[in-house]
Image (spheres, rainbow, N blue to C red):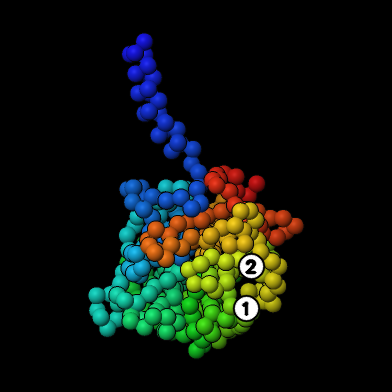
Amino acid sequence: MKLISFTLLFLTSTLLPLISTAQKLVKPGAVWYDDKGEVINAHGGGLLYVNKTYYWFGEKRGLSASEGVNVYSSKDLYTWKNEGLALAKSTDPASEIATNGLMERPKVIYNPKTKQYVMWFHLELPGQGYKAARAGVAVSKNVTGPYQYVKSFRPNGHMSRDMTLFVDDDGSAYHIYSARENYDLRLVKLTDDYLSATTQDTLLFSNHREAPAIFRKDNQYYLITSGCTGWAPNQASLHVATSPFGPWKLVGDPMQGPMADKTFDGQSTYIQPVQGKRNAFIFMADRWNPKDLKDSRYLWLPITFENNQPVVKWVDQWELARLGK
């Protein structure tokens, strides 16, 4: 009897991990690990889908320090491989991307004409706090890098802090960014090589908003932003337009569920279409921990649609297979 009990206990203890890993679930706010068992360090980030693989670019953070841009890869959006630093801090103290500066909210897009991967990010120069408010640009022939830093600037003279990139169906690329001490949210069309801003630059609205995340469904564009309350969470807002240049109409808060009025204790960073699924999108946000930025957690939630408007509902865990249903 004791031998049978011991055998059952042994089988149960060995099978349980297999059962739990076989049922793949996204758990917003949990600690997420890469394939080596290390905590994923990719904050304020975004995804890029290339050759049946997703690449996740995000800020590498210490307790507070900005340590460059990490990149991870995944075939299924569940299991992530650490591909290392896509863009490292420079050891040259005179460099704009030297230590004691900030590289925030990195986003990467691919330019089929130049065959280059182009990374944009919010850059703050070393030792200047948040005074510089510039857009930084880096390039690579390989999706995982290493990326070579090209330049930084203020688009058409405007301050540029929280930002995202968006490539439309016609290949036009746009930089959406917070300007004028974050009181303005602006959109500028990029040059054909995606390396610079054109003069097609417009004010979307002035409402002290940041953390832009945009996507397109059919002929509508949807833009989710947060308020400006430092590291503290606040209420999200949803704007809708039929053109990237607007006009953009405010339609309210798309979040539903516990702490919806605080974006579930998070802040938007990106919205990812799921490859191979119609009308399937993932809302990506960060749950910032200012006492230990490396420990800031990731909130990925499915976007559903009610009355043709996107809704983000809180769930403790969910399956990618259910997206688009």
User: Is residue 297 depicted above or below 11 in this figure?
Assistant: below
Q: In which quarter of the image is the N terminus?
A: top left
Q: Is residue 174 visible?
A: no
Three-letter residue code for mark 1: Asn
Which amino acid, by three-letter code, is at mark 2?
Ser
Indicate the secondary structure of the residue bearing disc 2.
Answer: strand
Q: Position of 174 compared to 221: left or right?
A: left
Name the spot of residue 32 as percent of width and height, x first. 42, 51
The picture quadrant where one finds residue 56 is: bottom left
- Report, in whole angstroms, how far the alpha carbon at label 2 lies from the one at label 1: 11 Å
Nearest to the observer: residue 23 or residue 73: 23
Q: Name the residue under label 1.
A: 207
Give the mark, 2 or 1, whose residue is nearer the N terminus: 1
| Residue 264 position within the rendered picture, expressed as x and y whole percent measured from the top left | 56, 58
User: For this rendering, which residue is in front, 239 or 198?
Assistant: 239
Check the image and report above or below for 151 versus 167.
Answer: below
Q: Residue at x 52, y 83 (%)?
A: 181
Quadrant for residue 214, please give it: bottom right
Q: Tell whether 242 sits left or right of 178.
A: right
- In the rendered view, does 145 fall on the left or right side of 220? left
Q: Position of residue 232 (x, y in %)?
A: 51, 67
- Which numbered marker is on residue 140? none
Q: How crowded is mark 2: few (under 14 residues within 10 Å), some or many (20 or more)?
A: many
From the viewer's side, name the closer residue of 152 and 258: 258
Which residue: 44% across, 53% down?
A: 53
Is residue 170 positioned above or below 159 on the image?
above
Task: Decide if residue 243 is in sight here.
Answer: yes
**Where is residue 121 shown, x and y percent of the image?**
43, 73
Helix, strand, or loop for circle 1? loop
In the rendered structure, the answer to whether residue 41 lies left or right of residue 277 reads: left
Q: Mark 2 points at which residue?
A: 237
